Image: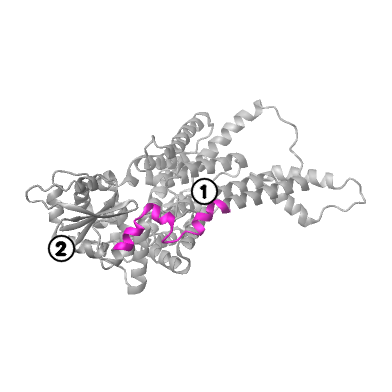
Amino acid sequence: MSGRYGRYTSVKLASLARSARPFPSQPGPPRGLLRLYRWLDLPHFFTAAIFLVLLITAIQPVTDPDFWWHLTTGDWILSHHAIPRHDLYTFTVPDHRWITHEWLSEVVMAGLFGLGKLPLVSLFFGALLAAGFVLVYRSIDRRVNFVVAGLSLVLGAAAANVIWGPRIQMVTFTLSALTLLWIKRFCEGKSRAIYLLPLVVLLWANLHAGFFIVYVFLGVALVAEAAKVVLHRPDALALGRLRALALVLLASLAAAIVNPNGWDIYLYPLQTVGSGVQQTLIVEWHSPNFQMAEIRIFEATIFLLLLGLAVARRVETRQLLLLLTGLGLALQSQRNLALFTVVAVPALADYGQQAWERLRPRLKRSGRPLPASGLMASVNGLVLVLLAALVMVQMLPSLVQRVDGKLVARDFPVKAADFLVQHPPPGHMLNVYGYGGYLIFRLFPQQPVFVYGDAAVTGDKLLEDYAHLQYLYPDQPQLLEHYGVNWVIFHSDDAIITELRQDHNAPGHTGWFELHTFDKATLMMRDTPDNRAYATSALG
């Protein structure tokens, strides 16, 4: 038995065997009981407790604004037996090309929702995220102490806490963790599973555009391993394995085009990353705000990594380059914090283990580990049961979430949408960006929206115009006329609502009146006779 559990467990089992046979005539514990003691010893107990706690992070209620239009798209694909090629949801850019890079995830999401509504969606993505955590944990070197490994995983998960949830991005997190694990094991000569990576990319390219990270990870690994060859490092890959790594990269590049969009699949991530408007206006693409409490753990992780690098005696080149790549991506956009977790946790555990090994000789040792016993196993088992019960309590909101429930109404205009379904207003809407997906879910196909979460479909020009409308630029009245906006739905405290409530009647500008406020969502309409008649009819 070897690895982070082996030595500790074998000593405890030996102690158990000695303590269990005080007299030669007495029978020893049954083999099944010995196995139970082994799986409830301190290392296994600690690791199980870590993953139970991480389930709280993994299984969360649906709060992502994009979830709703993804769900609607999945339903559309299933009902039409086709992949949409152009925008379905807006009146502003209906002719725009749509690269449906998430079509398969959307179909899966629609199927899950049809079977078990929001709770099943949360459980599925929670299981997917938990699988990603397991893969990240397995990327940690086996020589790392179980405490260091577990705490590194918890810290890495906490560093990206703003990202986790029932989102299609979790596909990329988990498959990125799988990619890194396969690269590590291949470079260490322990596995050839990396030859399956092109098949993973083929699936991934139909699930989410984050498959691009495969090329980044493989490219960094190739550079690191080629540098070892050039420098004649003793741990350098054989040239044949280096060529195999390059061939896997080429095969993965080719595999991605097997999707409904063909080569166009490569355009989507390039459009997104290359769009200054999206990077500026969409919060998720902003750099992490270190003034936010949620980002402080990411900040602390960076400092711990720097400290680990300072004390580490061995720094593996490939691991360091991947760490720097992940850190650079995360500092560029908080959306990439999940990728930072994938590369940072193994590095943090490695450096933490080296720091522990340097510190351990200076610490006073007790001389022997605590012996394993039935009492210890029972206590550990009881604690795990209690912890599992606590996790279930924390997960309960996700397991009982309803489409018309309080959790959804907290973030989305449920009552306003109910009103709009019953009393469809005339003309075009101007909606706040974050409401777009939910309004699509409730109003499609009868009422198109102004803007929604797929910024690559709507394009930079519409995003710029939306920003001018929302933030009260001087050309706002002209844009309202240009798009033929007849009514507006925004958060009640948004500046545009405050402005329209003032009902100013400048030359060439029609005034506005408040139709109604539903919880935190306010509807404003142009002050025209037809709209007043509609308001009287709808509100009674």
Residue 42, percent from left and from top = 68, 44
Between marks 2 and 1, how big is the CA–CA gap? 60 Å
Residue 109: percent from the left, percent from the top? 42, 64
Q: Which amino acid does label 1 sit on?
A: Val
111 relative position to 35: left or right:
left
Q: Are the residues flagged by discs 2 and 1 in contact, CB closer than 8 Å?
A: no
Residue 279 counted in the magenta span: no
The answer to if 402 sits in the magenta stretch is yes
Q: Is residue 132 visible?
A: no
Above or below, 36 relative to 206:
above
Q: Residue 430 in the image: state x and y as whole percent.
A: 22, 55
Residue at coordinates 55% horizontally, 45% vertically from top-left?
140
Q: Which of marks 2 and 1 is in front?
A: 2
Question: How many marks can you see?
Answer: 2
What element does badge 2 sit on?
A: helix
Residue type for callout 2: Asp
Disc 1 on helix, strand or loop?
Answer: helix
Left or right: where 497 falls relative to 69? left
Q: Name the residue under label 2.
A: 530
Q: Mark 1 points at which residue?
A: 136
Q: Residue at x 58, y 36 (%)?
A: 353
Q: Give the range drawn in magenta.
A: 392-419
Quarter of the picture containing the C terminus is bottom left
Picture coordinates of residue 243, whole percent (x, y): 43, 52
User: Residue 252 versus residue 444: which sits nearer the camera?
Assistant: 444
Seen as rendered, the residue at the extreme right is: 25
In-front residue for pair 227/485: 485
Whether residue 283 can be seen here: yes
**Please, what is the dominant secondary structure of the magenta stretch?**
helix
